[in-house]
Amino acid sequence: MALGKDYANQHCSIARALEVVGERWTLLVVRDAFYGVRRYNDFLVHLGAPRAVLAARLQSLVDVGVLDKRRYQEAPPRDEYVLTERGIRLWPVLRALGLWGREALPGTLPMRSFHHVACGTELAPAGDCPACGLAVPPADIEMRPGAGLDPDPADPVSRALLKPRRLLVPLELPPSESRRV
Ligand SMILES: [Zn+2]
């Protein structure tokens, strides 16, 4: 039997969530948005997704209210994509997937570690800061490069993500770098 295009007969909340984020590339777009990527060309160069697929994923994330599309330039028109509150609530999902991948899939090296901005302590698996005893929201998390990081020298986004940086802070690339796709 052919696979259906969606899970229309499923009322489970996992199935409903997968309707939103279960397509190939979608969660990686959301991941990059947490890292500060906002512009189509920057997603494109970092993900390497086909252009039409990336455009479709961005639009569907806007349609479901995970990303907000904002015009940042009029001539020529250019939009950027910013996580909404609904989108920011996906952070624990990404975090749990990353931890599961590291623990369950042999040979997976830590690409990045996540720390509480206020004190620098690495966050516990549940997302709280062991030193402060606080649940740390994404805006208060600093991402640091890990041992498994192997950036593509031709990709200015992956080079920019080599430095420790706070989640959700917009990634600013020199114009000559970010527009050459
Ligand atoms: Zn702390």
Image (spheres, grey):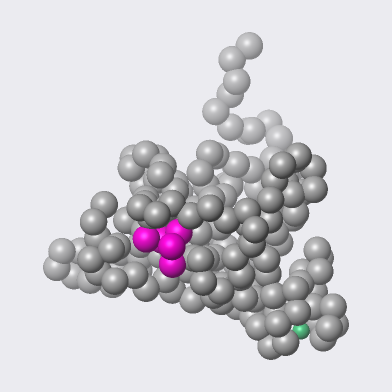
Q: Quadrant of ligand 1?
A: bottom right
Where is residue 141? Give x, y as percent. 64, 76
In the image: residue 165, left or right of residue 154 = right
Where is residue 84? Give x, y as percent. 52, 68
Where is residue 18? Give x, y as percent. 64, 43
Instruction: Examine the structure image and report whether residue 52 is included in the region drawn in magenta.
Output: no
Comparing 150 with 51, the one in front is: 150
- Magenta segment, which residues? 156-160
In the image: residue 2, left or right of residue 81 = right
Name which quarter of the figure residue 72 lies in. Answer: bottom left
Comparing 6 with 120, the one in front is: 120
Name which quarter of the figure residue 160 lies in. Answer: bottom left
Task: Determine the main secondary structure of the stretch shown in magenta.
Answer: helix
Name which residue lies at 75% across and 40% down: 105
Comparing 93 with 108, the one in front is: 108
Question: Residue extending furthest top?
Answer: 1
Q: Is residue 139 visible?
A: yes
